Amino acid sequence: AGKSDGKGQYRFFDPSLYHQIKSRTLLKQHLIEAIERDQLQLYYQPRVDTHSGQLCSMEALVRWIHPEQGVIPPLDFIPMAESNGLIVRIGELVIAQACAQLAQWRAQALPLVPISVNVSPKQFSHGGIHRHLEAQLARHQLPASLIEVEITESAMLGEHESILAQLEALRALGVKLHVDDFGTGYSSLSQLQKLKMDVLKVDKAFTSQLGLSTEGRVFFQAIVSMAHALGMTVVAEGVETAGQLNILRDLGCNEVQGYYIARPMPAQDMAGLLQQLPSGKGQVHPEHLDQ
Ligand code: C2E
Ligand code: MG
Ligand code: MG
Ligand code: MG
């Protein structure tokens, strides 16, 4: 290090690294401004019962509504927020926005359907997520059953010990716990059962294999029967075709989510959908949702 690389520059002054650091700092600054200007908004994607088509819940998926760049997807800023600590603030914002949204829909006499929020492992290591959630639920006088928490499989294994107490605290509140992106990590179903996870969300990589190969179907079948034996509900993510939905129904997969049912949509569009439901609960069919 410190030696010339032969192009008249020192290695420890790597201009691309310099620009990376500079742009990362800039992005962090922009993200802080975005938070302050209320540019982080939740989109909602329906999750429906495979057999009845009934709306079971909706997943809150954050987007950065940028005045010039338009809608920026979470993968363009969440990983960065996880590495610079902003994720804690974003996580609180997401929970607060989801609870406020439920309260608003209730005020509009729309049916109350649970919202599931994604929680990053960093929010767990920071601690206090259950206190924040409890405070927001109390603020809007909402039952804990209206919020579900999704944690990726890899996140749970990484910090097993510290996370355990917090999962327990969330469960004590009455929140349902979901394992997100199941199949992409290395956990076993028995480990997940020990953690008392309620719902398995099988990663879309496996859903996309359905109908393409026998192995794909066999794999899914095995997950469904083991999860059911352990008392867990199974959700398939990323359902994009009628064929996949039919196979999942045959396999006894409980619930589905994906573009075939509906894409993630802004709160206003979701309100329109809720309005079409018979009071309390209702059916959501793909035909219903296609504009
Ligand atoms: P995820 O929690 O696994 O969310 C599902 C992702 O799959 C979403 O991407 C959703 O739009 C997409 N998706 C849904 N149906 C389909 C389909 O049929 N086909 C395909 N190809 N994709 C589908 P999105 O919204 O871009 O979010 C990506 C990831 O960002 C999420 O994955 C989640 O890990 C993370 N994320 C989103 N919102 C939050 C948040 O508020 N907090 C945290 N910590 N992470 C979030
Ligand atoms: Mg999720
Ligand atoms: Mg997922
Ligand atoms: Mg994911």
Image: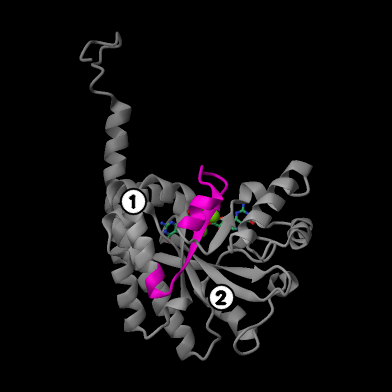
Estimate the x, y position of residue 187 in percent, counting from the top left: 51, 46
Q: Nearer the viewer, residue 81 or 26?
A: 81
User: SS class of the residue under badge 2?
Assistant: helix
Q: Whole-percent x and y of residue 45?
A: 57, 67
Please report the bounds of the magenta region as a residue range: 171-194
- In the rendered view, would you say 264 is above or below 273? above
Residue 214 visible in the picture? yes
| Placement of the C terminus among the 4 image quadrants | bottom right
Q: Is residue 167 above or below residue 105?
A: above
Q: Is residue 172 left or right of residue 153?
A: left
Closest to the observer: 2 or 152?
152
Q: Where in the figure is residue 284, as x and y percent of width and height?
A: 68, 75
The disc label shown at residue 161, or none: 1
258 or 39, which is in the foreground?
258
Q: Does the segment drawn in magenta span residue 187?
A: yes
N-term mark: 1 or 2: 1
- The structure residue drawn at horizontal position 68% and vertical position 66%, both measured from the top left corner, is 261
Q: Are marks 1 and 2 in contact (CB under 8 Å)?
A: no
Q: Quadrant of the N terminus?
A: top left
| Residue ID at (61%, 63%) | 263
| Magenta stretch holds residue 113 | no
Disc assigned to residue 79: none
Identified by mark 2, the residue type is Met
Q: Pointer 2: what residue? A: 270
Q: Is residue 39 visible?
A: no
